């Protein structure tokens, strides 16, 4: 019997290395496949879209916040992997009565790397997890040498009608800091903002995420009316908010984004 502690402080006791895993979070689902656990993943959510082949073929257990417990039971998992922010607390608490559930709680790059290593330990893929973490750390370390301290104020919008933005205690906000910019918000979580409040914030840059709201080019014009002096850009929401193996692509993406915005 092996004992593990998740990022929320819960203790799990597993009699053996999990062979039937249901993943409840898209970024962690992708991570499991990149660790070589294609056969072990027996179920995932509707939003676990990468890799496409597994999205098309693996059983689905509902959405991240609207899980379908009966479908999970049918799969007879020996481990569920979820996330504090992305999954519904009451549903997770119910599932914990029946199954071992490992929960992540990720606010920054360090948390993400710890999560990858913990999942590597639980699934007996420590070698793969270590290699992945080292590659991510190396990429971010190289990128950090290009970061300057110029005060660039950024507003990152995730929703429209009403506008919602990423607050200071989010993984997205940490990614903004990794670029060398800073979040113009002081609020935590994902506050709603009026057009007038956005004008008062006066960000230098407004980033419009591709998810969960699919911002398009017409929304750039809309925001230009609110903040005519801001540089407004559509960005890949997966790169900014997925904290698994997609981080391998993040540093290069941020480097290109920064160059295009600051030196068009």
Image (spheres, rainbow, N blue to C red):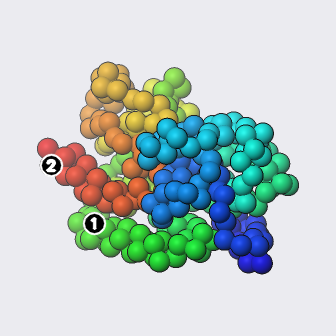
The quarter of the picture where residue 105 lies is bottom right
Q: Position of residue 225 (x, y in %)?
A: 32, 22
Quadrant housing the C terminus: top left
Structural distance between the alpha carbons of marks 2 and 1: 17 Å
Vertical comparison of 102 with 231: above or below: below
Vertical comparison of 134 with 164: above or below: below
Q: Position of residue 184 (x, y in %)?
A: 43, 47
Q: 42 or 82: nearer the eye?
A: 42
Circle 2: is it few (<14), some (14-19), or many (20+) Cα within 10 Å?
few
Label annotation for residue 143: 1
Quadrant housing the N terminus: bottom right
Q: Is residue 42 left or right of residue 164?
A: right
Q: Position of residue 19 (x, y in %)?
A: 65, 63
Task: Name the residue carrying label 2.
Answer: 263
- Residue sticking out furthest to the left: 264
Q: Residue at x 66, y 71 (%)?
A: 17
Q: Position of residue 57 (x, y in %)?
A: 52, 41
Q: Residue at x 40, y 36 (%)?
A: 210
Residue 127 visible at all? yes
Q: Is residue 24 left or right of residue 254?
A: right
């Amino acid at each position: 019997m092996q004992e593990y502690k998740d990022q929320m402080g819960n203790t799990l006791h597993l009699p053996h290395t999990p062979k039937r895993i249901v993943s409840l979070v898209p970024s962690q689902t992708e991570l499991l496949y990149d660790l070589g656990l294609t056969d072990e993943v027996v179920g995932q959510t509707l939003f676990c879209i990468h890799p496409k082949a597994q999205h098309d073929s693996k059983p689905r257990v509902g959405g991240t916040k609207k899980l379908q417990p009966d479908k999970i039971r049918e799969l007879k998992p020996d481990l569920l992997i979820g996330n504090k922010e992305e999954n519904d607390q009451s549903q997770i608490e119910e599932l914990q009565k029946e199954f071992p559930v490992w929960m992540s709680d990720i606010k920054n790059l360090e948390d993400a790397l710890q999560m990858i290593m913990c999942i590597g330990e639980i699934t007996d893929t420590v070698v793969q997890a270590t290699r992945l973490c080292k590659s991510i750390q190396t990429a971010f370390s190289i990128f950090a040498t290009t970061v300057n301290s110029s005060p660039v104020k950024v507003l990152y919008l995730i929703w429209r009608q009403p506008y919602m933005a990423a607050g200071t205690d989010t993984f997205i906000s940490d990614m903004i800091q990794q670029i060398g910019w800073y979040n113009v918000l002081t609020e935590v979580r994902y506050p709603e903002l009026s057009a007038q409040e956005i004008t008062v914030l006066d960000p230098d840059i407004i980033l419009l995420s591709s998810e969960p709201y699919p911002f398009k080019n017409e929304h750039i014009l809309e925001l230009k009316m609110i903040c005519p002096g801001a540089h407004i850009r559509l960005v890949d929401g997966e790169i900014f908010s997925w904290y698994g193996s997609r981080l391998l692509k993040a540093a290069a993406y941020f480097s290109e984004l920064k160059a295009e915005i600051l030196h068009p």
